[in-house]
Image: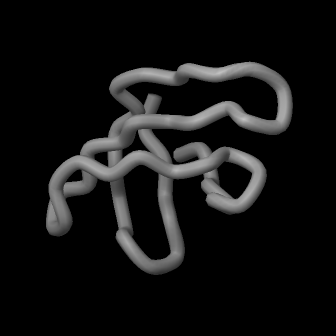
Amino acid sequence: MNVLHSKFGNGKIIEISGEDANKKATIFFEKFGQKQLLLKFAKLEII
């Protein structure tokens, strides 16, 4: 799934792990490489 983040820009979700409030997404961003973000704070927009 492709997403948009306000700071990192366009990215593609590689993996989602964890449970409930601790869910993390591993995302590969075009300009910043791979990042792991907590979904409750990430504010991602699906594109």
Q: Residue at x 62, y 55 (%)?
A: 44
Q: Residue furthest bottom?
A: 7
Residue drawn 37% across the image and 68% down it: 9
Q: Toward which corner of the image does residue 20 lie, by quadrant? A: top right
Q: Position of residue 21 (x, y in %)?
A: 83, 37
* Applied colour scheme: one colour
26 over 38 or under it: above or below: above
| Left or right of 22, for residue 36 | left
Vertical side of 39 occupied by 19: above or below: above
Say which residue appears at 50% left-offset and 65% top-offset. 5
Q: Say which quarter of the image contains residue 2.
A: top left
- Locate residue 29, reporting x and y percent: 26, 54
Position in image of residue 30 (x %, y %): 18, 57
**Residue 13 vertical placement versus 33 (above, below):** above
Image: 9 above or below 37 = below
- Residue at the right extreme? 20
Which residue is located at x 71 percent, y 61 percent?
41
Q: Is residue 44 left or right of residue 7?
A: right
Count how many numbered circles sit on residues in the image: 0
Front residue of 23 and 14:
23
